[in-house]
Amino acid sequence: MSSRDIDSTSENVLHDWAREEAAVDEPEEPAVDGSEPDSADEAPAWGTASTTAEPLEPAPADVVEAQNDSVAEVAEVEEAATEDELEPDSGDVEIDETPMQVELSHEHAAGDLHIPDGYAVLEGVAEGGRRAVGVVVSRFNGNVTTQLLDGALAELSTAGVRQEAITIMVVPGAFELPLAATALAKTRRFACIVALGCVIRGDTPHFDYVSSEAASGLQLAALETGVPVSFGVLTLDRIEQAEARIGKGAEAVRSALEMADLFAHLRAAAAR
């Protein structure tokens, strides 16, 4: 082999070696034709994004048909419901027009108290005698409280309380009854106090607050002063309930007079 051939062969070898190094330095571009790699070495590394987009499979024909059937069934149900709403009531249906009977509740148990013999018993009676009575009445719901007052005055007259011995104090509403009753009781001029008022339930909790405070306040007035204070306040759900309970005014008078007489017997017994 001549020196020219050796130089030519060396140049070819060096050229091929440089071309192989360039091929090694350049990274291989991933295939974009969607074909899978031939071996595990050619597979993309875990966590790298894949540029292969999977084509959407068309919905099977039976699924599309089932969906169409469901839509048709819903349309039929809605159409049937609309026809039922528009269809007038049948003449064969009988309507019971008999008014509903509501049984009235029993607020009190029947029967009298029985005390065994051999015990010392203190008990008062609803007699006026020479006693002075204070009456506190609210102006609110005046149509009802006027009737309560009329019944209370009639009962006081029946019990023997003279008209000049009765003092009537008018307040705006049931909430003011306790303060007025306390003021009358503290004068020590009255044997008992009769409180009359009316609270009717509305759409707000106002009824609960007023009726509760009126009851507890009147009780507190009696406890603080030692003077009997009777509760003649109607607490109604509806105005129609007032007529059957107008007698509470007279009942409050009897309770007040009985407690006044009872306390008189207690003082007499304690003085002996």
Image: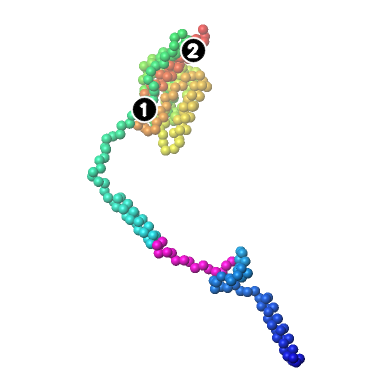
Q: Is residue 187 visible?
A: no
| Residue found at the very far top of the displayed protein | 272
Vertical order, 255 against 30 (above or below): above
Depth check: give the residue in front, 74 or 250. Answer: 74
Residue for point 41% across, 22% down: 252
Residue 210 magenta? no
Vertical order, 135 against 200 (above or below): above
Q: Which residue is mark 1?
A: 105
Assign a secondary structure to mark 2: helix
Q: Which residue is mark 2?
A: 266
The stretch in magenta equals: 49-64
Please name the amino acid that badge 2 sits on. Leu
Tell me where residue 50 appears, x and y as whole percent: 57, 67
Tell me where residue 60 appears, x and y as whole percent: 42, 64
Tell me where residue 154 appears, x and y as whole percent: 36, 20
| Quarter of the view holding residue 172 | top left
Residue for point 63% across, 74% down: 28
